[in-house]
Amino acid sequence: MAELAYLQVARVCNQRCLFCSNPPNGRIISWEEAAALVDSFAERGASGLILTGGEPTLFAELPRLVAYAKSKGLDPRLITNGQRTAQPGYLRTLREAGLEHMHVSVHSHLPEAQARLTGNPGSLANIRRTLEGAFGLGIRVDINTVINKANSGHLSALARRLVGEHPFLRHFVWNNLDPLMTQASLEGLIPRLRDFELELHRAMAFLDSCGRTFRVERVPLCYMSDFPHRSTETRKIVKGEGRRIFFLDEKGLKVQGRASWTYGKSGSCRPCSLSPLCAGLYQMDRYYSSGELCPVFSSPQEVARRILEEG
Amino acid sequence: MIPGVSLFYFQLFLVLGLVASLEDWRERRIRNLWILLGMLACLLGLAALLINTLLGERGVRFLDLGEYYLPWPFYPKVAAHLALSLTAALSLWRLEVWPAGDAKLFILFSFFLALIDPNLSGFPLLLFMVLLINVFVPPGLLLAAETLLLACARIPSLFKLDWGREAKAAAHRTGVRLAQAWPHRAEYLVLGMNLFALFFVLRLAEARFQRLVLGPFGHLLVYLFLCALWERISVLLRLKAAGIAALALASLGALFASLHLRLDLLREMASGLRMAFNFGLFLSLARGAFAAFLERQSLAELKEGEVRPGLLLSEETWERLKKEEALSEKLGAWYPDGLSPEETEALRAWIAQGGRGAGFTAYRAIPFAVWLFLGALLTPSFPGTVVSLLISSFKEGGAGPSRPGTPLAIMNQRVDLKVGFRCNNLCKFCVQGDKRERLPAKPLEDLARALARGRRSGARGVVITGGEPTLHKGILELARLARSLGFETVQVQSNGRFFCYESFVSSLSEAGVTEFSPSLHGSRPEIHDFLTGVPGSFLQTVAGMRNVKRKGLRLLTNTVITKANYRDLPEIARLLVSLGVEQYQFAFMHVSGRAALNKEWLLARKALVEPWVKRGLDVGLAAGRRVMTEAIPYCLMRGYEDCVAERIIPATIIFDAETVIEDYTRARRAEGKAKGPLCPGCAWFEECEGPWREYPEMFGWDEFVPVEKACKR
């Protein structure tokens, strides 16, 4: 089973995202622990290493860790909010250490919305600097977006704006909001599936039409319109992939396999022909309502075929 | 086909209108006798209709009025229309804009209009306004034509003018006028504010009564109308109290609009402001031109022989003459249709006694009754507004006005007979709610009465439906009865499961059923059965469809579009074509009844559905079948506009559970469907019914993008 390894290096952050699913607890990994984990991931033959947090750029020895992972044969990737990386010098250091690929979190193309969601008025401006800087240094950048009530009305505009202004962006990751450990419920940020169904479809159709790729996480297939083969969970189910995550909190090292890609299923899922390929509804009937699920009768073989064809 | 009653009243209106016009032309008076006769005829007609409506409920025929039948809800509308016309005419008379005779004639004509065609646009609330505006159209056209002719004749003399001096004089005059206006600036401010309030309210009214959008031509007509009455109205508009009232009204309107219409208020306000400004410009220019034109036309001197009834003196002349001792008693109020016989007499006597007739301004005038008559003639001849007439005739290249989507309520083409609400399916999108448990099958006698009534209202076809009509014990007898009453088509709208019994299909056909209309909601059992809630229903329905076709009978189907089956539409279409259906329809789910309970998950987004619907239609079009969609607005049917079912749904009278819907088209448009804030800008605004209103209530309007005029097919 191919595995992707996730390593949280710092649970501190320079933004205050309302929907943060790994909120700050003040811990920063020690160099020894980080190096040991990288060693163990490399030994297990992980297919890649994703450095995350918190905000991983706040881990002082990040460039060194990038170089170390690289030396162990793991291609390190970074998931960052794109604030510290806005400093050209810092980004160059990372590039020189061997960083070739990073994910930047953008939740809205509207400065006010992005500022409100991240608690940082300068967020979007810094992200633009990061994107252009990374392009200049030849670092591949993918976009991560958390789908929430505040951006559910303009997901397609976000995609259009980003692709229009930064045509070098090739890949997008849409994550439906994870309500656990967040203050999102208090802020009324948890979307209903209906809220973003059409906009997500428009965003996906746009990205598909201009040759970009994308993944969508925590959205059941009945809300994936014509793109069920783009669901992160479905792809992992079809390809039998897992992931290994080191949480910098009491959870410690977790291995996610087939069982982790199974959320809630309701009566509507019984007749659904895509159900065997669908993870179901995350946090069903706690934060997301099973009353929105609708059976789909399209061919699961077709979905699997498309996923395997893309590899 | 024009119903006899309409024709009769139209002819009567023509005769009375001609008589009154002629009389007003020759004698400058309108006899009360004609008005009384006309009113009497109208009242008698209304009474006869009322008796027919009363007895029609019981299935008895009193007077044979042909296809003309006024349903109950029309009587209060007629009353409202009459009350409004009466108020308008009385106000104009009290304001001394119209003489009493013309006011009476106006009321008579609007009564006639209500009887000639109770389906005119704007009826009942705005029809009187349309009539008022239309009255000003013929004089406007005449004036334009005359001006044009005069201008043509004068072109040579234009070259001889000293343009520099003319321009200087004009500038001087403007300067003097501006200087004169300065002391009245407060008044002008109030006037400006009032005009703004007036136009703002007009804009809001247009937004509310979307059927009567005035458009650029309409605004021009409103300007003309205001201009014509300017002397009187401007007095009102200059009053501060009226200003406060107008502003209060405008704010109330704005409040209402923001609560109920979801309008962009700022835009409407800007639009109102622009209209007020335009009107200011229009007023100065048009009145300037009008005055100049009349000056040239006027007689400089009053001569005894030329003073005759109907001669129009300028207001200024009138004021001067009224100051003459011999005349002050005898001249009444100034009216825009000239001298009355008494006034003529007095004026002649005054000139004969040596009164100086020089330096006066007088015009020849066509009596007002003529304009009233022509305006009233315009209104039913070109239903909708005059504006829609102008625009549509431009667009169609003069093909003449059409009136899409508003068939005569009084002439139903189809009866929709719901025989009971029991059903052997349990569809998740059913709109009938708990009627299936609550209501028994209707007794055959009631159904027979309904059929007879429907037939009387002009229907030629009947749709037997429910619930599931094949569960009704009397269905065969009902079909026979329908045919014996003269219905040409009898359709059974069913879930199609009982059609799987071959002998039953034969019996229906022998009893007179001409069309079989089952519903199929999936191309595979798991989809159809999931939606109908009955395992095995797919097999029975498809077998039933095969039976119908094997007997060579006409087969039409309906498919409800839901989130669970929209991707299956092309497959469904392929199955339907292979089964040999003559026609199939995709109807978008209507959130009502049980469908409302399932709306959170079963209602699909129209924008997502659109490509699949079109692919489904392509299958039938390629196979040469008739294909349709229902409840999908034109903006989502680009390239497939001919498939919009609402274009051809016949006027229908529905016998529902406990009520009768006399005019389903009207009810569906007025209550069932809705239009969005951008819809008035769409090329299909008139024809389109919009989505069922529950849809935008859930999802808003951003999927519905107005179609550019140039893109209309």
Image: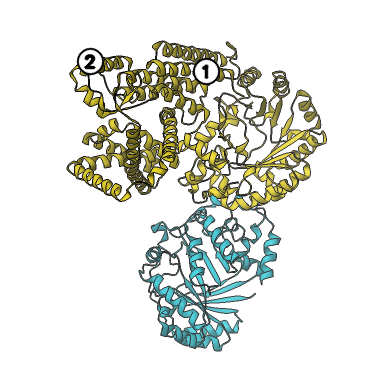
Chain colours: A cyan, B yellow
Residue B560 appears in the picture as rendered: no
Q: CA distance from mark 2 to mark 1?
A: 50 Å
Nearer-the-camera pick, A125 or B419: A125
Please tell me which of labels 2 and 1 falls first in the chain.
Answer: 1
The disc label shown at residue B9, or none: 1
- Asked if residue B504 lies left or right of residue B110, the reply is right
Nearer the viewer's eye, disc 2 or disc 1? Answer: 2
Residue B368 appears in the picture as rendered: yes
The disc label shown at residue B353, or none: 2
Q: Residue at x 55, y 64 (%)?
A: A217
Question: To which quarter of the image does residue A84 belong?
Answer: bottom left
Q: Return the x and y of residue B172 as percentages of the image width and height.
A: 24, 47
Q: What is the number of callouts on the image?
A: 2
- Asked if residue B49 lies left or right of residue B359, the reply is right
SS under mark 1: helix
- Asked if residue B617 lies left or right of residue B385, the reply is right
Q: Residue at x 30, y 21 (%)?
A: B303
Amino acid carrying mark 2 in the image: Gln
SS under mark 2: loop
Q: Return the x and y of residue B485 as percentages of the image width and height.
A: 69, 18
Q: Are marks 2 and 1 in contact (CB under 8 Å)?
A: no
Amino acid carrying mark 1 in the image: Tyr
Q: Return the x and y of residue B471 as percentages of the image width and height.
A: 69, 28
Q: Return the x and y of residue B441 as percentages of the image width and height.
A: 63, 24
In this view, B74 is above or below A41: above
Q: Chain of mark 2?
A: B
Question: To which quarter of the image does residue B559 belong?
Answer: top right
Nearer-the-camera pick, B328 or B281: B328
Q: Chain of mark 1?
A: B
